[in-house]
Each structure stands twice: as structure tokens, then as C-alpha cells.
Amino acid sequence: MTSVFLSLSAVLAASAVASPAAGAAPAADRPAAVPSGWEAVDGTGLTRITGEAGARQAPSATGDEASTAAVEPELLALQSARNGRFTATEVNYAAPNTGVLRARSAEVGGAWEGFAFEWDEASETYALKSLANNRYVAVEKNYTGTAQNVLRARSTSAGGWERFVLYYNEQLDRWALQSTLNGLFVAMENGYSGSLQYALRARSTEITGSWEEFTLYDIGA
């Protein structure tokens, strides 16, 4: 399996964020929490980006561990800029953390590290569907303690809990996700220990650095 790095072209333009009813992000080209240099990416922009060839390739498994996912341009892998690991869906975790997202894989070994980014024109947001269990990623706002706002692939449909705004920084070649449920950015919990180490949580009020930054790879090629 060959994975292609997603680089932004000159055709990409910032898109205004039309927010859904529940817990929406500010309706502006760039919400106050988003630093200069970060721009929202709409469905057309992401489609154009994934259609381009890039120089960087994601490490991938071979043989029996190679991905058998369908070849679709919107199938992506997320690599944390903080620890260099790819995000996986923990389908074997026990409840209530079944399907939690963690940046723990050294390579893209299959469906565990794959996500379908589905663009919704009405709300101008994305829903992420895990290829590991065919469930949408939700922000667990009602969880408590260190698990509050953790990302978990557990929903059969996409509503306010499952909606995200996707941002790109051309200078950094990095991406960020903002939950529309609580308006917060997704961070990778590098400092956690135990089963939630490297978990993804929508908990940052702004993009402060590598904690909230990711690299996207096209795993459809």
C-alpha cells in the first residue's frame, strides 16, 4: 500500500464555517481561536488535494497486515505531529472506551489507521468514519475526568457530536481538527499514561503547537 502526502495547492481557498445547530464553531472565515496562517478546508479543496501526488509516503505494513480497504481518495490516515505516530481505532478496548482514537501506530497497517472524511455541504463540516469498525467518530463531551471530550468511533450516524472543521497551515504542511460540539481543537495526549496514552481529545482552545497538529496521508492509492 502506497500512501501519498497531502500538500496544499494554490487552488485551495478558505471557506466560511456554516455551523450546525448543536455546539457550533464561530461563524467566521477564521474563528478568533485560530491563529493566522490556518485556513478552513472545504470538500472541494480536500478532493483536489487528495488528487495530487506528493513526495512523502507513510510507512505501511506488507503481506497479511497490508490494508484491504477500498481504493477511495477520501480515505486518510492521521499522523500526530507530536509523537510521529498514526491514529488507530481501539476496537478491542472494553466499554466505555471501545473505539477510542489513539496516536500509537508506527505504520499504516490496515483499517485500524484508516478514516473516511465525509464532507457535509449543508453544515460545511466533516464527519470521520473509522474503517476499523465502520462507526463515526464522536466527541465524548459527557465523559468526566481525563477522558472528557475523548474521540471515539462509536456512532452509526453523524450529528453534532460527530462534526469537525478541518484546517490547514500551508507553511507548516500540517492540519488541525476543531469539534463543532464544543468549539475546541483536537489534541493528542502525549503526557497521558495507561490505556488512554496518546488518546485524541477535543480540549484545546487554540492551536498551540504539535499537540494539535497532524499530517494527513491518502491511503487510497
Image (cartoon, rainbow, N blue to C red):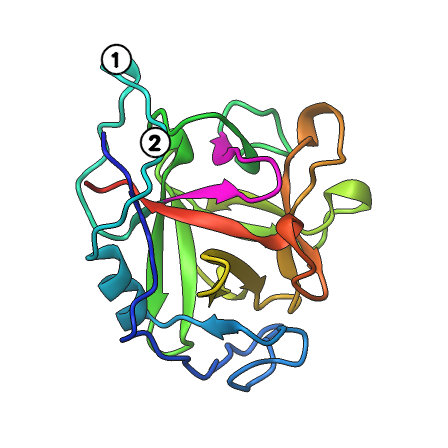
Q: Judging from the image, what secondary structure is the residue with disc 2 in?
A: helix
Would you place residue 178 above or below residue 105 in this image? Answer: below
- What residue is pinned by disc 1? 64
The quadrant of the rendering that contains the C terminus is top left
Main structural element of the magenta stretch: helix, strand or loop?
strand
Location of residue 41 by image quarter: bottom left
Residue 111, numbered circle: 2
Residue in view at x 27 percent, y 61 percent: 49
Q: Residues within 10 Å of mark 1 (few under 14, many from 20)?
A: few
Does 130 sit left or right of 1 as displayed?
right
Amino acid type, residue under disc 1 in the picture: Asp
Residue 21, x across and y down, in percent: 54, 78
Location of residue 206 by image quarter: bottom right
Residue 7 among magenta residues? no
Q: In the image as oriented, which residue stretches furthest toward the bottom?
A: 28
Residue 124, x across and y down, in percent: 40, 75
Residue 212, x across and y down, in percent: 62, 53
Amino acid type, residue under disc 2 in the picture: Ala
Would you place residue 175 above or below residue 56 in this image? Answer: below
Q: Judging from the image, what secondary structure is the residue with disc 1 in?
A: helix
Residue 196, numbered circle: none
Q: Nearer the viewer, residue 214 or 199?
A: 214
